[in-house]
Amino acid sequence: VLRHTKSGKTTFTNFEIFRMRDSNIPNEMLEVRDRIEHFSWEPKGHRFGIIHGPQDNRLDISFYTLGAIEGGDKIEKLYTVTGKSANILHWSPAGNNVILSSSVISGALEFWDVDENMSTCSTEHFMCNEIHWDPSGRMVATVVTQPMFEPSSMKYQLENGFNLWTFQGVSLRKVKMEHFYQFSWRPRPKSTLTKKEVQKVMKRLRGFMSKYSKIDQLRKKRMDTAANAEKISLLGEFRKRAEERAKRSAELLRVRLEMGLWEEEKEEEYETLTETEEYVLNEKTEPF
């Protein structure tokens, strides 16, 4: 709810948060004495972020928590990140990770870890006009699409395409495409596991990680062994051919010597000269 003082010179915003999963659906009020630019919930979790500030070019980003999805105590402010040019939040479907982006043409991007209160990467994708997280939350695509049947579509043609990133902001791939109009991830089906089964998996997660890490290491060792065997085979073939070439060269040299087309070089026909040059690298005078 946007409110203003009686004079109308100062505006502030009230948020009414309703806890739909609690009995009697209690509601809480959160007052922010600033202009609100953007509001966004964390998809999986109990946090939300707001972008606010008096100026469009430098805004503050505040993160809040409800304590819990069900039965939380009260709304609590976690922290505020000041002086950012971003005006849109793009949460990962898995929660925690969020991209701070700007709607301006520069395409500035900042990957933010909400748990650690830290930026994992600052980068840009020029003229980026769409951001799409994959359903798992592991990767994200920043996209430049060309609007159809609009006069402004011409200015996007040179930058059409998409970039793929990890959730930490590591660049994976950059693709340029002409006449690019839409990007969409393949939908991820819902898990067939029950809530109890998911909790059981999470409890045994470290064991699974150890198990599959050993499998990955064994597979890598086999791949390295196969690669080394191929290198050894190629090296053996190279040495065999080098030996054949050396024999052929010696035979040709013998023939040339017999025909008088080549004279064998003798060391006594050469004079070896040795020159010594001295350079002063450092000079230091010390008193007696």
Image (cartoon, grey):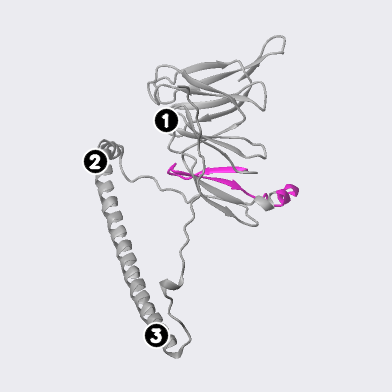
The quarter of the displayed image where residue 266 is located: bottom left
Residue at x 42% of width, y 19% of height: 24
Q: Categorize mark 1 by other alpha carbons within 10 Å: few (<14), some (14-19), many (20+).
A: some
Q: Is residue 148 magenta?
A: yes
Q: In which quarter of the image is the N terminus?
A: top right
Dot 1 corresponds to which residue? 45
Residue 115 vs 30, above or below: the answer is below
Position of residue 189 measured from the top left corner of the image (x, y, whole percent): 41, 48
* The residue positioned farthest toward the right in the image shown: 151
* The residue positioned farthest toward the top in the image shown: 6
- Disc nearer the start of the sequence (1/3): 1
Whether pointer 3 and pointer 2 mark residues with C-beta atoms closer than 8 Å, the reply is no
- Disc nearer the start of the sequence (2/1): 1
**Distance of label 3 from label 2 (alpha carbons):** 70 Å
Q: Does the magenta stretch include residue 131?
A: yes
Residue segment shown in magenta: 129-155
Q: In which quarter of the image is the C terminus?
A: top left
Position of residue 274 measured from the top left corner of the image (x, y, whole percent): 47, 58
Query: In the visual, does 155 lie left or right of 28?
Result: right
Dot 3 corresponds to which residue? 254
Residue 286 vs 152, above or below: the answer is above
Residue at x 52% of width, y 21% of height: 80
Q: Categorize mark 2 by other alpha carbons within 10 Å: few (<14), some (14-19), many (20+).
A: few
Residue at x 64% of width, y 25% of height: 58
Q: Is mark 2 on a helix, strand or loop?
A: helix
Mark 1 is on which residue type? Answer: Gly
Residue 34 vs 57, above or below: the answer is above
The residue nearer to you, when weighing 221 against 78, is: 221
The residue nearer to you, when weighing 5 against 251, is: 251
Dot 2 corresponds to which residue? 207
